[in-house]
Amino acid sequence: MLKSVKTGLGLACVLAVTAGCSSTDTDDSAQQEMTQQPQEPVVDTPPEPKEAMPLDNIVYFDFDQSLLKPDTRELLIQHADRLRGTTQNVRLEGHADELGTREYNLALGERRANAVRDFLVLQGVDANSLEVISYGEERPAQSGSSESARAMNRRVVIVK
Amino acid sequence: MIKKLKLSLIVIFANCLLVVAAQAQLVVEISGDVQDPTPIAISPFGWSGSGVLSEDVSEIVSADLRRSGLFDPVPREDMLSFPKTPENVAYRDWRILGTEYVVTGRIEPQAGGYLLTFDLVNIFGQSKMFTKQVRGSGQQLRDMAHRAADEIFEAITGIRGAFSTEMLYVQETTRGGRPSYALMRADIDGARAREVRRFDQPVMSPMWSPDGQEVAYVSFETGRPAIFRENLQTGARQQLTDFEGINSSPTWSPDGTKLAMVLSKDGNPEIYVLDLNTGRFKRMTRHFAIDTEPNWMPDGKSLVFTSDRGGKPQIYELTLATGQVDRLTFDGDYNARPRVSPDGKTLVMVHRSRGVFTIATMDIESGRMRVLTETSLDESPSIAPNGAMLMYATKRGDKGILAAVSLDAGGKYNLPSQRGDVREPAWSPYFD
C-alpha cells in the first residue's frame, strides 16, 4: 500500500535493494540516486516541502514493528549524508496507527524514532543533534480506519 | 463553564448480543440475555410548586436504571395510573403489567431549591420498602434524580449506585482547519458536559485522584509529553514531569499520596512511582521491553501493567515491596491497558484476538477471560466505582464514541458525541 503511495521513489528503492543483494551499500545508493532523478516529478510528496531539494522526510513501518524496512534504509543513508558534520538539530517524530492502546502506541512511536536515530548515528550523525519525540497515535497523518490510512500513520517524520 | 457539547444517549439492550468466543478455551461465550432485567415503574413525580420544572426528574431516574442493564423501566405511556404516594399504588394493576417495583415521588419547593420525597414499593410483596428524601438547590434537580436512582438501585440489587458519578474524557474537534483538543467533564449519563481545559496539542490519559478533586493527564503543550496534575475545582495545575522521552500513564495510588507513571529517560519505557509529598521518583521496572500503562491494586501493594517483554503485549503484576513481576494474561496475542476492579478480583483490558480489539475481563484468581464487547476498535476501559459497569472508547464509522457495558455484559449503551471525536473516558470515584 505505502509503496504505491510513494510511487517512484519507494519502488526504485525496493528494486535497487533486491537487484543489488550482493552489492555494497554505496552501490545501492548510487543506483538509487540515478533511478530517483527521472522519477522525481511523479513522487507524491506529503504537503510539507520546505527545502530547495527536498528528500522524502517520512519513513514507514509495519504493524507493531520498529524494524527499519530495506527501502527506508536507503532514504536514511541520504539523510545521514546531508546531516553528517553539520550541527543542525533534527527532531525525529515517532507515530503509530490507531490499532492498540494509546499509551502502548506512545512507546511504540518512540521505539520507531529510536530505530531511526540509532541508524543515523551509525552512519556518523552526531547523536546530540537528534531529538526523539513520540506522538503515539495522537497525531495521525491520515484519519480513517482503512489499511492505507493506517500504513501512512505508522511513521517517523524527520523534522529539520 | 460553556457547554460545548451535548452527548446524546442511546440505550441498547443486548438481548440478542452474542460474542463469539475468541481463540482459546478459557474465553467464555456470552450472550446478553443471561439475566432478565427487573421490571420497575417510576411514576411521574408530583410537583407542588408553580410553573414547570426544568428537568423531568422521574424520567432521569428511569433512564439511569435502564442504563444499568439490570432494570427494564415501564414506559410512561404503558402505565395505567400515575400514583404520587405508596397509598395510591394499585397493586393489582401493576401486577398485571408484570411490574415488580413502583417508585412514587413528590417534589416541593424549598427556600433556594427543592425537596424530593420518594418511595420504593414492592408490588409482589405488597409492601413499601422505604421512603427517602433528597434536597438540592435550584440547579441540582439532575443531581437529586441521580441520588434517588442510587438509593433505588442499592435497595433492590444490594450494589451501591453510581449514577451520581462523573467522567472525564478527551474530545478532538477541528478549529480553523487545525485539530483542537479538550479535556472534558460530564455526568456519567453524558449530560452537563463542560470543558476542563482546551489544548492546541494532544492531551491524553486523564485519571481521577481517589478523592475526585484532581485529575492527572499527559499534555504535549511543551513540545513533548509531560504529566500535569490539575485541581478540578480551582483550575490550579502543576507540571509534574519534564523528562526527555516519554512521560505518560499517570495513575494515583489508592491513598492519593503517590503517582505511578511511565518514563523513558533511561532509554526505554519503565514504570516509576512519584511520591507526591517528597517529589522523589522511584524506578520500579528494569527491562529493555516496553513497560507501560500501570494501574494500582486496591491495596496499594502492587501494580498491574502492560509489557511486551514476552514478545507481545501482555499484562503483568509488579509487587512493590519485592520488585517481583508475574505474568497475569496468557490468552490472546495482545492484552493491554489493564484496570483493576474496586474489589481487586477482576481485570479489565484491551484484548485482541483474530485481529479484533475488544474489551475483556479476567478473573485474576482463575485466569478466566471473558470478552464483553463485540465491536472492533475498543480501548481505554474504565470501571465504575461500584464495579458493576465500565466505560470505554470505540469507533462508529470513523468517529470516536464512548460506550458502556456492564461487567456481566448484560447492559450496554453508547454515548456518541454530536461534534468531533471523543475518547479515553475515565469514570470518577464516588465524591463522598
Image: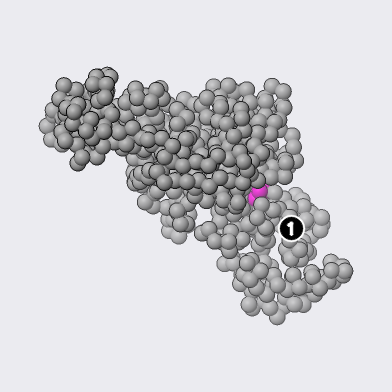
**What amino acid does circle 1 point to?**
Leu
Total labels: the figure holds 1
Q: Position of residue A48 (x, y in %)?
A: 59, 65
Say which residue appears at 44% left-offset and 46% top-offset.
B17
> Is residue A20 visible in this depiction of the protein?
yes
Q: Secondary structure at mark 1?
A: loop
Q: Is residue A108 magenta?
A: yes
User: In the visual, does B300 lie left or right of A89?
Assistant: left
Which residue is situated farthest in the left direction here?
B50
Image quadrant occupied by the C terminus of chain A: bottom right
Image quadrant occupied by the N terminus of chain A: bottom right
Viewer-proximal residue, B268 or B332? Answer: B332
Q: Position of residue B137 (x, y in %)?
A: 25, 27
**Residue B304 falls in which quadrant of the image?**
top right
Is A41 drawn above or below residue B163 in the view shown? below
Q: Is residue A37 magenta?
A: no
Viewer-proximal residue, B317 or B245? Answer: B317
Say which residue appears at 39% left-offset and 49% top-offset.
B417
Is B85 drawn above or below residue A88 in the view shown? above
Chain for numbered disc 1: A
Say which residue appears at 36% left-offset and 30% top-offset.
B164
Chief secondary structure of the magenta portion: helix
Question: What stretch of residues is rendered in magenta?
Answer: A106-110
User: In the visual, does B153 lie left or right of B318?
Assistant: left
Is B82 drawn above or below residue B311 in the view shown? above
Kindly identify which residue carries mark 1. A68
Say which residue appears at 58% left-offset and 61% top-offset.
A147
> Is residue A129 visible in this depiction of the protein?
no
What colouring method underlies this structural image? one colour
Q: Position of residue B367 (x, y in %)?
A: 62, 33
Q: Residues within 10 Å of mark 1 (few under 14, many from 20)?
A: some
Q: Position of residue B42 (x, y in %)?
A: 24, 32
